[in-house]
Amino acid sequence: MYGDFSLGRAFSESTESIPLSAVSKARLDLFDFAKVARISFYETGSDFPEAISDLEAEAVKKGSVVIQVWLKLTAPWIGKVVDVLQARGFFLGGVLPQWFDDDGLLMQKLLFMPDFESIQLYSDRAMRIRDIVKADWRRSYEK
């Protein structure tokens, strides 16, 4: 996803467990006109599974059909957080360079079938990113 846009970042596998002492801090923003809910997690903690469950339920209750989750990509336990989201049907949306001063990760869930073929893209790189997102959506859909 970063391709030529690394900006000197170092990448490593996320293998740490979510610390029991960490507490999630999040904000839910609803965009009624677009039926989109954006859940920004400024911190993720051991309560993350319950926090995302409650926020997702609230978003769906209020009519959202697209649920976006923004996470700090630099949390050492981000892999475990992503595992929780993937188990709930979320898939990769993209990276958000410098979104939280650190880089962010966008995960998303759609309550409808996406039409990936209708997306108009200009560059080969954009098409490769679309294919990565589509493959991750397929993984979440086939569960």
Image (cartoon, grey):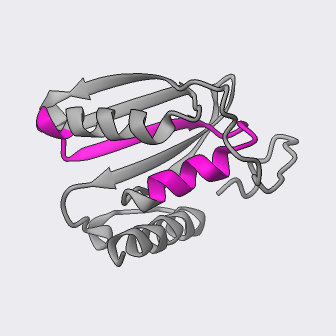
Residue 138 coordinates in the image, percent (x, y): 39, 75
Which quarter shows the C terminus?
bottom left
Q: Based on the displayed image, in which of its 4 quarters is residue 103 positioned?
A: top right
Which quarter shows the N terminus?
bottom right
Instruction: Residue at the far front: name it.
Output: 20
Residue shown at the point (54%, 64%) measured from the top left = 129
Residue shown at the point (31%, 43%) measured from the top left = 67
Q: Nearer the viewer, residue 43 or 21?
A: 21
Where 85 falls versus 31 (above or below)?
A: below
22 relative position to 93: left or right: right
Residue 23 coordinates in the image, percent (x, y): 57, 24
Residue shown at the point (79%, 47%) measured from the top left = 6
42 relative position to 21: left or right: left
Membership of 61 in magenta stretch? yes
Residue 29 coordinates in the image, percent (x, y): 31, 23
Residue shown at the point (17%, 38%) measured from the top left = 35
Q: Nearer the viewer, residue 4 or 69?
A: 69
1 relative position to 118: left or right: right
Residue 89 coordinates in the image, percent (x, y): 36, 60
Q: Based on the displayed image, in which of its 4 quarters is residue 101 positioned?
A: top right
Where 44 falls versus 49 (above or below)?
A: above
Q: Which residues are magenta?
A: 60-86
- Label tally: 0
Q: Nearer the viewer, residue 74 or 33?
A: 74
67 relative position to 96: left or right: left
Membership of 89 in magenta stretch? no
